[in-house]
Image (cartoon, rainbow, N blue to C red):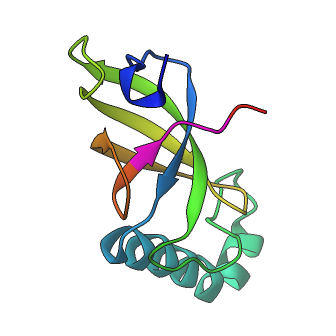
Amino acid sequence: MTAAAVVPTSGRIVGYMLDSYDADAINRRRAAASSNLPEHRDRNDGSQLHVGNGVKAGDVFPMMIVRVWGNTPDGAVNGQVFLDGNDTYWVTSATVGEGERHYSWPTRA
């Protein structure tokens, strides 16, 4: 079975490639968190800040599929992208393929 024939299902881990919109959103919320760090420490209320390394368009991160739209190999999915930090990034309506804003199946050894 080729990767193109795999039907996505909830709970599967795939690779997701960020586009410039994704990268800007992630970096923007992390910058805002960094600028509010002193206030956050003073509050000590249990809220979580978005902290982690910067990202750029073209970076690939693991994504867990959480919702599938359809039951075909080319169906769109929603997922949680696991970033290099303490946060995740929610992606909607991503499709399998190459390039930015697409996901791909991991290579099996």
Rendered position, 56 above or below 76: below
Looking at the picture, tell me which residue is in the foreground, 105 or 27.
105
- Horizontal side of 78 relative to 65 (left or right) equals left
Q: Which residue is outermost to the front?
A: 1
Q: Which residue is outermost to the bottom?
A: 35
Q: Residue at 46% across / 17% down in the picture?
A: 10
Rendered position, 102 above or below 68: below
Q: Residue at 61% across / 65% down in the picture?
A: 50
Rendered position, 76 above or below 28: above
**Magenta region:** 103-107
Quarter of the picture containing the C terminus is top right
Q: Where is residue 48 in the image (x, y as percent from the top left)?
A: 65, 56
Q: Position of residue 2 (x, y in %)?
A: 47, 24
Type of secondary structure dominating the magenta stretch: loop
Q: How many numbered circles does the render carry?
A: 0
- Horizontal side of 61 relative to 5 (left or right) equals right
Q: Residue at 24% across / 26% down in the picture?
A: 75
Q: Where is residue 65 in the image (x, y as percent from the top left)?
A: 47, 29
Q: Residue at 44% across / 65% down in the picture?
A: 18
> Within the image, what quadrant is residue 78 found in?
top left
Looking at the picture, tell me which residue is in the foreground, 4 or 52.
4
Looking at the picture, tell me which residue is in the foreground, 1 or 49.
1
Looking at the picture, tell me which residue is in the foreground, 83 or 3.
3
Rendered position, 70 above or below 86: above
Q: Where is residue 93 in the image (x, y as percent from the top left)?
A: 24, 40
Reply yes or no: does residue 105 show up in magenta. yes
- Horizontal side of 98 relative to 17 (left or right) equals left
> Within the image, what quadrant is residue 40 found in?
bottom right
Reply yes or no: does residue 19 show up in magenta. no
